């Protein structure tokens, strides 16, 4: 059993990987606030600041969208790691890849925060989410494969997680493609997808979500 | 039992939600320091820097106020989660909403830090605290409702938490309204409310506070 | 027993206070890196950048000093909390006060990082450390008082912690006063105090340190 | 047994040191995103932003390299701490030294992010990694020495960790020296070393890696 990190003597256990990942999720979600630029006005004048702050309201959309999306990834990460028994080297690598994308999210959020929903900004934003969806799926594919080596067949829960984890890698690239012709609509879709997940009455019976 | 995330096999347990929330509280409270602007003087001259630093002292008021307020939310969050048995989907959603507001606090704190207690800056600051009070109350309402489905009646402790959790959503919007005519007084009230909570001799017998 | 938060049903337990405090310590210590300004040169020219980076080397002194000082506070915080049985309201308040000072440390570190060891910058730096020393002592005084209500008399360990915790509140204000006439020497003393603590051969037999 | 912090009554236990270190690793890795500068263009114009973002793509190389390197240090830190029984004062000091270097990594990453792979920027970057390698080795040397005082002889696992922990302190300074004549090649080597570690098929049987 080369490459096992999991429960081997010198290795990494599941709880530490989860808690390190949680740290990155919590920090990335909090760091998002720096992506909302403080208005740059010439003098400390209330009239100017009022106008500037009102004009900044749409900049809350990417902030809230990124916040909710990282929140969803965090929730689903837990569902997924519930199926992990041993943390293999490949699982660690793919998990770090997912964290790399999550930790990067404040950057495209900041680009939209600064320049608004320009085409290139939303394409970058969507490409980041698409990369996140792919990394998430690759991680799930790996975890599921390790699980199959133990249990032979997927049960209903595993199949249902697999179905739901395929939604992101399909819809995110499509919404990103849309950003080339209609960036604001595309951003609206990213916002809508995140909001949809949190609406309780639309919620599927199990919670591994989009 | 649709929508349960709580103790179900693939779900999220209470300890993880608390530790993730604690992470966001700890990061947001530490990130506040970036809201105090380092003086921008023309040359590295001690006279200029002394003047600039002395002039920056009032900027410590929103820093300390936000710090103490996040501290209070953190304390009360624990009291509140003590009553949670299963983390339902709605609880998670409302908790993320509260964290969204908490993680946003460095932004209005930074606006006041940069432009001083201008009317629009304090209104934004108060609106953020009011949103936090509302999110906190909604979360408590949901937790209490889940608890009632188990225990039929509120006991004295629960009623006392309910009373105290109603203080914020009432006083914060009032102080925010006041900011339209007297922003500095309004900021003083936010500061006073936070300080009041920490004064030991004024403390109510139980600590679920304002 | 009004005002107890400690082990009461709705309250805050010691482990959570410690883990929240650890979060603030870890985050503040990492955030210090933002206090070292990236050189602002006109063009991406290696010669210019070399000069600018070499000139920035003294800016590492306040970075390392603040890092080591927060590290020491973290270490001593643990020794101190080992003596806590119940987390009373006053203990929580004083702990948050200490965290407020610790979370503020990146600010004076950034002021020195930007303008060098100017008198006003080092005075601010020293005043922050002095406030930290005072907050630490007040917290220890409170913890010791709660302990005395249980055990009547201080044992040797407690007395030794008390002696060591008095070093900071004495030396830090003195070094701060010195900053008015010799800021660079004063900064050197803050650096020396932090370094001294980590030198193993100078270490006192118990580790509650300066 | 002077200088023991480990398991003594007033001391620091291993779990806290690990969790504090994990906090610093998680924050430093997430803070790296601030090292990628948001393009500074004159107006919110899509054409300008597209060009600026495309030109920023190479700036992802130091981001990914630093991310992966901190990830590797985190992984190896766990392997190493597995061998710790008591946390001695020296171990704490060397661990804080390693954390100091890790927390500093966003700075040289930011310098390259802003000015590109200039010679002085890559030399600083490599010097930081070399310092990290040295701190890591010194920490391992100390942990191994404490272990030897208990067990007399190294077993195969310990020897294999020792061999692998010597790779960094050798290759990093060499790659840093190369930066003086070929900074881009040098940066490529730092990237390659990090990538190499994560390639599963090249992975050594045990995972204490470079």
Image (spheres, coloured by chain):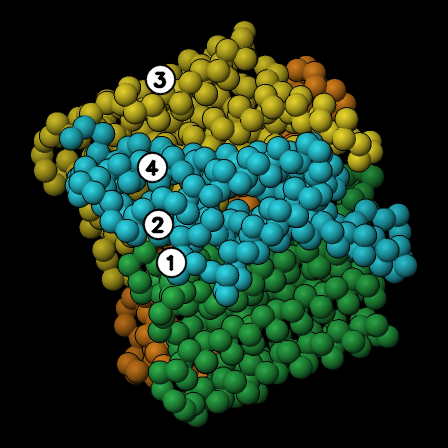
Chain colours: A green, B orange, C yellow, D cyan
Question: Do the CB atoms of the residues marked 3 and 2 lie less than 8 Å apart?
Answer: no
Q: Secondary structure at mark 1?
A: loop
Which label sits in the foreground, 3 or 4? 4
Report the side of D44 relative to C66 (left or right).
right
Spot occupied by residue D72 in the image (x, y as percentages of width and height): 48, 52
In the image, is B169 to the left or to the right of A174? left
Circle 2 crowding by C-alpha within 10 Å: few under 14, some 14–19, many from 20: some
Q: Residue furthest left?
A: C152
Chain under disc 4 = D
Crowding near pointer 4: few (<14 within 10 Å), some, many (20+)? some
Mark 2–mark 1 CB contact (< 8 Å): yes
Disc 3 chain ID: C
Q: Earlier in the sequence, mark 2 or mark 1?
A: 2
Q: Name the residue beneath numbered marker 1.
A: D206
N-terminal of the pair, mark 4 or mark 2, is 4
Q: Residue at x 60, y 39 (%)?
A: D175
Residue that carries the numbered disc 3 in the rendered image: C170
Q: Residue at x 55, y 52 (%)?
A: D194
- In the picture shown, does residue D70 fall above or below C95? below
- Relative vertical location of residue C173 with respect to residue C156 in this rendering, above or below: above
Callout 1 environment at 10 Å: few (<14), some (14 to 19), or many (20+)?
A: some
In this rendering, the label closer to the viewer, 4 or 2 = 2
- Where residue A147 appears, as percent x and y from the top left, is 40, 81
The Cα–Cα distance between marks 4 and 1, rounded to whole angstroms, is 19 Å
Say which element carries label 3: helix
């Amino acid at each position: 059993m080369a490459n096992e990190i999991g429960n081997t003597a010198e290795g990494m256990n599941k709880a530490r990987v989860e808690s390190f990942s949680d740290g990155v999720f919590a920090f990335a979600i909090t760091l998002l606030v720096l992506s909302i630029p403080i208005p740059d006005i010439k003098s400390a004048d209330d009239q100017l600041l009022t106008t500037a702050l009102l004009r900044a309201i749409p900049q809350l959309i990417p902030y809230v969208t990124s916040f909710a999306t990282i929140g969803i990834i965090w929730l689903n990460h837990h569902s997924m790691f519930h199926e992990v028994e041993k943390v293999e080297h490949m699982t660690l690598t793919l998990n770090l890849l997912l964290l790399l994308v999550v930790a990067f999210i404040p950057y495209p959020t900041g680009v939209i925060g600064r320049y608004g929903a320009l085409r290139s900004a939303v394409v970058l934003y969507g490409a980041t989410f698409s990369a996140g969806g792919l990394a998430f799926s690759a991680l799930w594919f790996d975890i599921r494969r390790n699980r199959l080596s133990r249990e032979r067949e997927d049960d209903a829960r595993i199949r249902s997680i697999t179905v739901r984890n395929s939604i992101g890698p399909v819809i995110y690239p499509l919404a990103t493609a849309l950003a080339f012709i209609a960036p604001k609509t595309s951003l609206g879709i990213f916002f809508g997808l995140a909001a949809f997940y949190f609406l309780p009455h639309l919620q599927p019976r199990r919670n591994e979500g989009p």
